Image (cartoon, grey):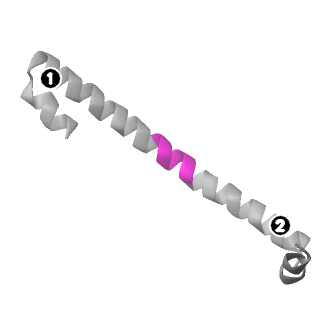
Amino acid sequence: MDILKDIVLPQSAQNILLLKYLLFVTLLILLPYLGVMIGTTFFSLVHFFKGKKNNNRTHLIFAK
């Protein structure tokens, strides 16, 4: 374990702060993207099952 401590350099406070900002920016981009993807998937599934239930080809095409 002492060998690993010697290899790894301790991170400065500026690097840790930069990592926190990058995490914030990444989450700022990722969370809305995931929300849109989950929302459109749910919307597509609703139209797919509605098309299967009512035998409506328009809903099935819209689901695709």
Q: Amino acid at mark 1?
A: Lys
Of callouts 2 and 1, which one flags the residue occurring earlier in the amino acid sequence?
2
**On the picture, is 17 further left or further right than 53?**
right
The quadrant in which the N terminus is found is: bottom right
Q: How many marks?
A: 2
**On the picture, is 54 further left or further right than 46?**
left
Q: Position of residue 60 (x, y in %)?
A: 14, 32
Q: Position of residue 9 (x, y in %)?
A: 86, 80
- Quadrant of the rendered structure where residue 4 is? bottom right
Residue at 77 percent across and 60 percent down: it is 20
Q: Which residue is mark 2?
A: 16
37, above or below 5, in the image: above
Q: Position of residue 14 (x, y in %)?
A: 86, 72
Q: Which residues are magenta?
A: 30-35
Q: Residue furthest top?
A: 54
Label 1 neighbour load within 10 Å: few <14, some 14-19, many 20+: few
Q: Position of residue 41 (x, y in %)?
A: 34, 37
Main secondary structure found in the magenta portion: helix
Q: Which residue is mark 1?
A: 52
The quadrant in which the C terminus is found is: top left
Tag 2 secondary structure:
helix
Residue at 23 percent across and 27 percent down: it is 47
**For residue 15, which numbered disc appears in the image?**
none
24, above or below 54, in the image: below
Q: Is residue 32 magenta?
A: yes
Q: Is residue 1 magenta?
A: no
Tag 1 secondary structure:
helix
Residue at 13 percent across and 37 percent down: it is 61
**On the picture, is 58 further left or further right than 39?**
left
